[in-house]
Amino acid sequence: MIREYVAKNMVIADGAMGTYYASLKGTTVVFSEPANLTEPELIESIHKQYIAAGARLIRTNTFSANTLSLGVTQAEVKQIIQAGYRIAAKAAAGRDVFVAADIGPVPALVSGADDIDHDRIMAEYRFVVDTFLAEGAAIFVFETFSSTEYLGEISTYIKRQNKAAFILAQFATTPDGFTRRGISNASIVSEAKNLTAVDAYGFNCGVGPTHLYNAVKKLNHRFAGNIISVLPNAGYPEVINERTVYAQNPEYFAEVMKNISALGVKIIGGCCGTTPEHIACLVRKLSQQPSVVEPSQPANGKANVTVKTVHNNFSAKLQQGEFVVAVELDPPFDTGIDKILDNAKVCRRIGVDLVTVADSPMAKARVDSIMLSAKIQRETGMETMPHICCRDKNLNALKSSLLAGHIEQIRNVLAVTGDSVSAADKTEIKSVFNLNSFKLIELMNRMNREFFADDVINIGGALNLNVPKPELEVARMVKKAEKGAGFFLTQPIFSSEAIDFLPTVKKPSQVKILGGIMPLVSYRNAMFLNNEIPGISIPEEHIHRFDPAMDRAEAEQAGIALAVEIARKIKPYVDGFYFITPFNRIEMVAKILQEVG
């Protein structure tokens, strides 16, 4: 019925549930959903207040009702959803009001296995949807999403159960016009239009009404024939006495929303910070003539800057099928960078194509990889590639770093999930892992389209062949390539099993692999790497080439000889070498390259 109604009419939705519930309670409440069981009368009262204000569409108090958000069992979530839907249906009974099942994003897992994440999260969405369907829900609102991931699949699932179901997908955006995943509003609209099981789409949360007015006006030409929704926040909150407080601005909110409605939007309402008063004011404004005063246009922050295009020699060589050499140099723990700059100069002199700089490996703080890569590039002329891991930065910080790196002429980046913080350090150091390597590659690929289209970043990934089932790692590599990675650096290769596996690797033709080579420097070094560093496995016969009694020169020569043997064995099956320089001993790499030719 809502499909027919919205074809001819504008639908006014309700406002916020969570922030309004918190304001009524006089406290900061993270989740309002448990109140479906503990305070059903209050939740019903909120629904009725929005209906009395003029809302024709109310959303159930179930936005965060999933096991991962609430940290409860499925049985408890089921009770919360059932109660939430029944409360809303009771509030709407006898009134010409639509009741929508409200579903928010299920939080991402940090397992490092993208396929496991997907299956687990999809199972959660199906469980939530099945609970609603059993209650008779026929309208579904998926809101505050940052991408279309999962939406196509779960919407199709709903339509298989109920062909008449009406599905609305809404996305949270930022003032600069991007979702939390870094996807532009224009791209999210293009993707949403292609979700065949979704009946309507739009924006909610993240920003206030003026920013959403500007966003919708800019994209209005893309909306032809589509049902569009806009449910902004009341504005931007401030923290007062440890409480998040939104400005009480119903008149302003309604005035801007009236202008939004004039753009042809069919479903309008409010998100965080809005109240029944906001909706009542909106209803009154819409009964008047449209205003001719547009909201003030915020500065777009863009300057007329001429960006210098950098020729990426490393990328060009890879694409042309030339054999390349990359060398990793360790960033220092302090401000002493003379050694790494000197080693970079040596790399340039001996014909190395790329210097890579790790991002605080082993979760121990070192000089920032992007800043150091930029300095090396400026002062030595050596092309560089910072590693960027997901351990220490959230999405905003990662995006900010990538933008800064591009400004500093960084055109190659290695995306890695990152080593975990040790148990001993976890009391003082907190991991972030807002993304994993798959999602970071996706982010960089989107930024290439949105920001760097004329001068893209060459995206690299990691490949570990030192595992019992390397074919699974190759499958992960292919998946990363599909998301935008063009080349891969392997973990150091030592075993005959890993070497023998290389010729069998099946990869897309455009994907390039650089074989990892780590020269050993002593018996103690070999034992440490084999026993304490994840992802490195050194056969006993290699370790026995070293003797604890060897002096430095003898041990280095043994390490060079072993590395030369490995390099010669893997060279026919890789597109380049990736040297992990032990203790920044660049002279060892120089000797290995000279012998390998």
Image (tube, helix red, strand yellow):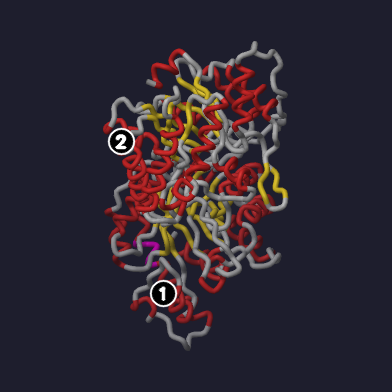
Give the label on residue 530, or none: 1
25 w.r.t. 215: above or below: below
Task: Say which quadrant the N terminus sits in.
Answer: top left
Task: Tell me the mark number nearer the camera, choosing from 1 and 2.
Answer: 2
- Judging depth in this view, the residue of 105 and 401 nearest the camera is 105
Q: Give the percent coordinates (x, y) of residue 503.
A: 29, 55
Look at the numbered disc 1 and give the secondary structure of its residue.
helix
- Label 2: which residue? 157
561 w.r.t. 249: above or below: below
- Magenta stretch: give its range: 565-569
Give the label on residue 259, or none: none
Badge 1 density bin: few <14, some 14–19, many ≥20, Cα 10 Å:
some
- Judging depth in this view, the residue of 407 and 594 nearest the camera is 407
Q: Give the percent coordinates (x, y) of residue 282.
A: 61, 23
Give the tally of numbered discs.
2
Visible residue check, residue 543:
yes
Badge 2 density bin: few <14, some 14–19, many ≥20, Cα 10 Å:
some
Per the model, the C-alpha gap separating discs 1 and 2 is: 48 Å
Question: For the stretch drawn in magenta, what is the main secondary structure?
Answer: helix
- The amino acid on which the numbered mark 2 sits, given as a three-letter code, is Tyr
Measuring 35% from the left and 30% from the top, which residue is drawn there?
138
Residue 262 sits in quarter: top right
Measuring 41% from the left and 68% from the top, which residue is drawn there?
536
Q: Earlier in the sequence, mark 1 or mark 2?
A: 2
- The amino acid on which the numbered mark 1 sits, given as a three-letter code, is Asn
Visible residue check, residue 489:
no
Residue 292 in magenta stretch = no
Q: Give the percent coordinates (x, y) of residue 567.
A: 40, 62
- Judging depth in this view, the residue of 361 and 392 nearest the camera is 392
Measuring 43% from the left and 15% from the top, which residue is drawn there?
7
Look at the numbered disc 2 and give the secondary structure of its residue.
helix
